[in-house]
Image (cartoon, rainbow, N blue to C red):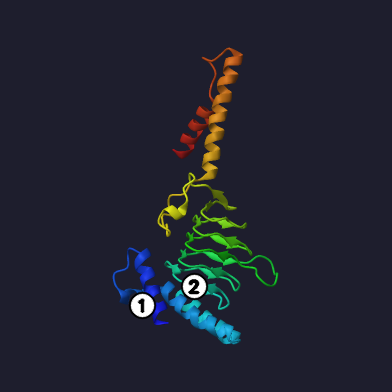
Amino acid sequence: MLGRIRRDIQVVFERDPAVKSVWEVILCYPGFHAILIHRVAHWLYKKKWPVLARFISQVSRFVTGIEIHPGAKIGEGLFIDHGTGVVIGETAEVGDNVTIYQGVTLGGTGKEKGKRHPTIGNNVVVSSGAKVLGSMTIGDNVKIGAGSVVLKPVPPNCTVVGVPGRIVIRDGVNVKDRNPIDLDHNHLPDPVAEMLFCMQRKISHLEERIAQLEGNTSDSQSVQHVEAGERNVCSA
């Protein structure tokens, strides 16, 4: 138990540049407190004391703002940064070296029984406000962007962004070749913006073709320029 506590403290120093001392972690980090209390509640839950386990988890929720069902399985090296609004469901499974930011939900869908919450692999980063819903597997080394809603399984070494979550290949670079715990979750590709940019280029190309066919390239007016002007007026 003491070894696991030391590991939990070490994780905070590895992933939070704001931490100054061990006492600061022990006294001021709700994610650290929530994990410690969850271990007690989970032990009681496995010993068939569900009501007492749930009561302890609710006390932890009141104190830390983090709700972890006592039935959830938590691996080694979990770091919950800030943590307010984090919810981890009963049948959720979290692997090793996972980082979870505030507002994350590992939840279920519907009223089905049995396994209804996600399984999170190792070295996964779940950014602020992300929702992972349903019985699915999130592979190792996955990064889920802030505010994403993931409803389908994600293979290893992927980045997921958007609502619903879309898998974005990171230039063919295997995440395992980089730092296994990649916390750079503010630089993520935007597939919607890329699609709009492609559409804009296509429209410009079509305008040029229409102008050439009409033989009136000098007097033709670009729809893109008109819309841009309207946007400037609105913004002004």
Q: Residue at x 62, y 62 (%)?
A: 136
Question: Image height check: is 35 above or below 178?
Answer: below
Quadrant location of the N terminus? bottom left
| Res. 48 image quadrant | bottom right
**Sequence-first tag of 1 and 2:** 1
Instruction: Look at discs 1 and 2 and give the one toward the viewer.
Output: 1
The structure residue drawn at horizontal position 55% and vertical position 18%, both measured from the top left corner, is: 220
Residue occupying the point 57% across, 15% down:
212
In the picture provided, is 193 more to the left or to the right than 19?
A: right
Viewer-proximal residue among 76 and 31: 76
Toward the top, the furthest residue is 215
Placement of 205 over or under 21, stated as above or below: above
The numbered dot on residue 66 is 2
Q: Secondary structure at mark 2?
A: loop
Farthest left residue?
A: 20
Q: Nearer the viewer, residue 11 or 27?
A: 11
Disc 2 residue type (three-letter): Ile
Specify the amino acid type for callout 1.
Ile
Q: Give the residue at mark 1.
A: 26
User: Residue 71 appears at what percent x and percent y?
Assistant: 58, 77
Q: Position of residue 215 (x, y in %)?
A: 58, 12
Categorize mark 2 by other alpha carbons within 10 Å: few (<14), some (14-19), many (20+).
Answer: many
Distance between the alpha carbons at the discs numbered 1 and 2:
16 Å
Q: Quadrant of the C terminus?
A: top left
Q: Position of residue 206 (x, y in %)?
A: 58, 24
Q: Which mark is residue 211?
A: none
Instruction: Describe the element under mark 1 as helix, strand or loop.
Output: helix
Residue drawn at 49 percent across, 32 percent down:
228
Residues packed near mark 1 inside 10 Å, few (<14), some (14 to 19) or many (20 plus): few
Instruction: Locate residue 115: give its quadrant.
Output: bottom right
Does 92 sit above or below residue 174?
Answer: below
